[in-house]
Image (tube, grey):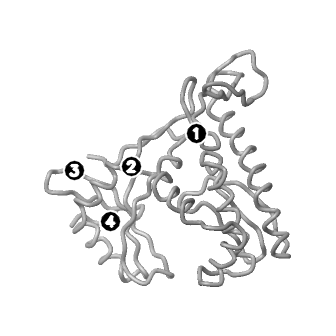
Amino acid sequence: MSPPFADGRIMVENLHGERVSVRLVVNSRARRISLRIDSRLREGVAIAPNKRALKDAASFAHSRADWLVRALKAVPAASPFADGAMLPLRGVPSRILYDRGEKLVRFEDGSPPLVRVGGMPEALPGRVRRFLQTEALKDIRAALLPCVAVLGRKAGPIRVKDMRSRWGSCAHDGAMSFSWRLILAPPDVLTYVAAHEAAHLVEMNHGPKFWALVARLYGDSGPARAFLRQHGASIQNYGRTGEPAAKS
């Protein structure tokens, strides 16, 4: 077994010589050792419930090298924001169009719809990202506030972030964070995530009472949850430049 790297990573290798970087982490809420894929960093993650179990987590990662290689190969390729690139704005395939004379980033309906961007060419990715963050916050507020009103609760600050493993979160003080990439999902999926986090203002768990609240606020969440399971990794890769899944 190769020793852990200084940054808490190991390399695992399958019988074909394909290598994958695996990050070792401790999560006190974990009940057992587990593996997952970080599609953003394109690496494996071995999770241990405590520091004593890190060695066993590393061993488990080595034993599952084939699975890690296959899973990382299945991670969709990164989709950088660039002139001519497509992105699913509110679930609708839309094209980024660079127009040097354009002062603002604006949406233009058409076939396909356009996200028209001006300024210096090297500023395009950042301008598109900020536009999407603004649109996401607007849509999330519009979906969230009616849910909060129905519950008779008060939400704290609402922010959009580049979230790695969750689509939203709700703190005990009512502060909420959402992935800005929800703007790249169909509107009903964004609305579901807003209802999900609103329900946490009442139930800070995922028990039967929580899901009853989600159903009251949103309805049948099955299709939206299925969409995120099926397409979430692809959505997470928009705006990224791409990194290799393994190093030799």
Q: How far is disc 2 from disc 1 in space, using C-alphas?
A: 18 Å
What residue is shown at x 32% (from left), y 55% (from top)?
71
**Residue lying furthest front in this view?**
220
Crowding around mark 1 (Cα neighbors within 10 Å: few <14, some 14 to 19, many 20+) is some
Sequence order check, earlier mark of 2 and 1: 2
- 221 and 140: which one is in front? 221
Q: Amino acid at mark 2?
A: Val
Residue 109 appears left or right of 25 = right
Location of the N terminus (image quadrant): bottom left
**Dot 2: element:** loop
Which of disc 4 and disc 1 is earlier in sequence? 4
Q: Label 2, on which residue?
A: 75
Q: CA distance from mark 3 to mark 1?
A: 33 Å
Tell me the residue that label 3 is attached to. Answer: 18
Point out the residue furthest to the left here: 15
In space, the residues marked 4 and 3 are separated at their CA atoms by: 18 Å
Label 1 sits on residue? 88
Q: Position of residue 14 (x, y in %)?
A: 19, 57
Please name the residue shown 59% across and 83% down the image. Answer: 207
